[in-house]
Amino acid sequence: MNAVNNLYNELFIKRAYNRYVTPIYQKSSGEWQCKFDGVDNIFVASEALWIPDTQIGNARTLDSVKAEAVKVVQIFSNGTVYFPVFYYAEVACPIIINTFPFDKQICPIMVMSLAFDASHAKVIARGVLKTDERDDHGNGEWDVTNITTINVNQGGSEYIGYVLSIRRVPNFYVYVIALPCFILTALSVVGMFWTPNIKKEQLVKLTIGLTSLVSMTVLLDMLSDAIPKTSVFPLLGIYVVVCVGITSISSVIITLHCLPNPKMKEEKLPTKCKLSEPVVKPDLLLKLNETI
């Protein structure tokens, strides 16, 4: 413990370190460890150090996670300072929705210093995820497939970027929009053309098609809320419009083309035969009486 206190006094008191002016003075690793009984690193409050203002440059929203907590930095014997910073950031990325919801996007996250140029602050990208670690990263809607880094030096300023390759998980859109749309279209077409379109059943068949169209408007409303408003029409939108078109054409065919009602066949009633009583003439009766 005394070695740590001596090291702290050496770094921040004896040298009259000013955190507003310069970074911490670096000493060689061997000299530090020998002089302070092999102490490799110490922890100090972040307020005691000069910390560059590196942050995410293309973030729409940038909030520090647990900003009220005490921030601690770790100083190593070779002069390296480890200062983890956690942010919640919303980054605006260019998006291509031609194959939505089976689309893949590339989203760069740029890290830069707003106050210092390349001669005062050098930014280096490290800590890229390994291939076997990327399966655990995502939010249920997106899967991270790859992460690469880029270094850009522009206008005397140097900044880095983490380029995220992400793939959309299409399960929600398939089960909630695509599959119900297919079922409604198939049932409406089968229901309208299963039997001959006679005039007596025309209104019933037309009701099936119109009901399916009304149901598809709910799916269209869900689709319009799910996709961004761009000039490119997505694949799922084309699919839903085709389903609506098939049902609409079927309804028009039912309306314009119908068969006349079949004529009722007259049933022949069976004839009833009555047995008539024998008629005996009077003169025949007289002859019979005389004979007797």
Image (cartoon, rainbow, N blue to C red):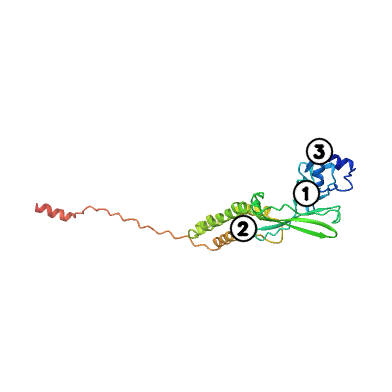
For disc 3, the neighbor class at 10 Å (few under 14, some 14 to 19, many from 20) is: some
Q: Nearer the viewer, mark 1 or mark 2?
A: 1
Residue type, numbered disc 2 = Val
Q: Residue at x 10, y 53 (%)?
A: 290
Residue type indicated by callout 3: Ala
Dot 2 alpha-carbon crowd within 10 angstroms: few under 14, some 14 to 19, many 20 or more: many
Q: Which mark is residue 240?
A: 2
**Residue 77 in the figure: left or right of residue 184:** right
Residue picked out by circle 3: 3
Quadrant holding the N terminus: top right
Q: Nearer the viewer, mark 3 or mark 1?
A: 3
- Residue 235 at x, y = what percent? 64, 60
Residue 114, x across and y down, in percent: 84, 53
Q: Which residue is mark 1?
A: 61
Q: Nearer the viewer, residue 219 or 195?
A: 219
Whether residue 211 appears in this view of the structure is no
Task: Name the residue nearer the viewer: 274 or 108.
Answer: 108
